[in-house]
Image (cartoon, helix red, strand yellow):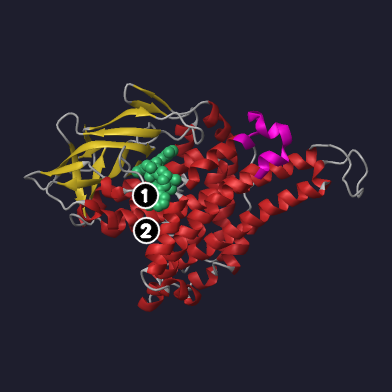
Amino acid sequence: MSYVAPVKDMLFNIQHLAKIDQIAQIPGFEDAGLDTAQAVLEEAAKFNEGVLAPLNWEGDKNPSSWKDGVVTATPGFKEAFKQFTEGGWQGLQHPAEYGGQGLPKTIGAACGEMQNSANMSFALCPLLSDGAIEALLTAGSDELKATYLENLVAGKWTGTMNLTEPQAGSDLAAVRTRAEPQPDGTFKIFGTKIFITWGEHDMAENIIHLVLARVQGAPEGVKGISLFVVPKFMVNKDGSLGARNDVHCVSIEHKMGIKASPTAVLQFGDHGGAVGYLVGQENRGLEYMFIMMNAARYGVGVQGIAIAEQAYQTAVRFSRERVQSRPVDGSVAAGASIIHHPDVRRMLMTMRAYVEGCRAMSSVAASAYDAAHHHPDAETRKVNQTFYEFMVPLVKGYSTEMSLEVTSLAVQVHGGMGFIEETGVAQYYRDAKILTIYEGTTAIQANDLVGRKTSRDGGQSGKAAGSAN
Ligand SMILES: Cc1cc2nc3c(=O)[nH]c(=O)nc-3n(C[C@H](O)[C@H](O)[C@H](O)COP(=O)(O)OP(=O)(O)OC[C@H]3O[C@@H](n4cnc5c(N)ncnc54)[C@H](O)[C@@H]3O)c2cc1C
């Protein structure tokens, strides 16, 4: 199914809503003006339209597979991932210090949307690496940063997020995976994590798992959770890869959508204990994981916009080609395509309005993120951080619920053909459903918005929204 990146619409938002000219005045972003944004988006469009989009349908028919603990990605994915990393796309918005391109999230988010429109299953892998990089940058020790960041930013290694266990989904207080301290300062990790996206695969040399676990004797509930780095292969002092760590993929799930993205059950410590390295301080794991979750939740919101955009484009193409009856208002002669029917136009315009509204919201949030992380003035950073955190559950919750409506309308515009797999829109509808579930269901986003981000400070964050950027 073809995809044409909406570069013009994206640049409009980047210029007028995200205000890229203001971002380019922030030290470190001097070269990240509108011209740079345009050049990067045009290159990204070529890669995503030409390399990732043609593999999307294949991924649905021929999902990742598991055999004896080894997961093999859909044919073509490994080669595409190599092209992705060689093009420097993983490092787009990460610091130059670790080999990234140091561009603003405002530009990175638009490229992320393209990746997800083209191939959501594929795009999940770099999305989770982005989250792992962000968590290590914020909470990792100098040693952890030196050991892992460069290869993660290069895409040579990929990252995962290990929260969920059979009894701990929305409620992370129920996490049971345990961490036993060792005399050398490392920990041995024991437990089972389920639903781990790209938790095992053959596209990268190493996989860096960020794992929530409880150190022996830690307090009950969320106050006793710590965060650990658990590499699939141990990393030697000289940076080369060492022995296999004791973390193994015992199966992957059969799913209704995003079939090419392997969803792994990971077993830690069945053969003596998986070696883990504490990130930051003990018992502050959830706080650190929230950094990763905020990055991933924003990214999942963008996935919603992306799949809705792709569904919209497919519906427009179909409605221009399909000929069926004369419009009820008699405006066009018989034999015209269905795009002339007022109801079809209503559906298409609804889809477009939703997509553009959500893209505008996410552009403004990305711009606030850039100011929050890079502006020289501390007060401006604080106001923008508050605003960004307030926007994350909205971008995630609203854009993903929106994607269900839009992909459903895309099926409707196709009539019976929409229900037939060959048109591709059925896949978008199935793929979109996970977006309102993972990274916190819509109810969890609502709790976050109403509880943490509104009630807790008497609505101050919401009010601060007006003065951000
Ligand atoms: C394909 C896929 C990929 C995933 N990838 C990852 C991953 O990479 N890493 C990872 O750690 N996890 C991952 N997950 C797990 C995912 O984040 C959880 O499935 C999700 O958080 C929901 O948890 P649950 O499935 O246990 O549902 P539950 O928590 O059991 O929720 C069931 C229902 O109860 C509602 N509910 C629960 N608590 C509340 C509450 N407090 N208030 C209101 N309503 C509530 C929910 O909204 C939902 O409707 C993935 C899951 C899938 C299916």
Q: Hey, which residue is sitting farthest top in the picture?
A: 68
Q: Please tell me whether mark 2 sits on a helix, a strand or a loop.
A: loop
Image location of residue 32, percent across then percent down = 50, 64
Mark 1 close to ligand 1, CB under 8 Å: no
Type of amino acid under label 1 = Val
Residue occupied by mark 2: 95
Q: Quadrant of the N terminus?
A: top right
Q: Determine crowd level at label 1: few under 14, some 14-19, many 20+ residues with C-alpha closer than 10 A.
A: many
Q: Does the magenta stretch include residue 248?
A: no
> Which residue: 41% across, 75% down?
460
Type of amino acid under label 2 = Pro
Mark 2 close to ligand 1, CB under 8 Å: no
Q: Determine crowd level at label 2: few under 14, some 14-19, many 20+ residues with C-alpha closer than 10 A.
A: some
In this rendering, would 28 be left or right of 210?
right
Q: Please tell me whether mark 1 sits on a helix, a strand or a loop.
A: helix
Establish if 427 lies above or below 308. above
What secondary structure do most residues of the magenta stretch adopt? helix
Viewer can see residue 305: no
Magenta region, residue range: 409-426
Residue occupied by mark 1: 153
In this rendering, would 271 be left or right of 16?
left
Comparing 241 with 7, the one in front is 7
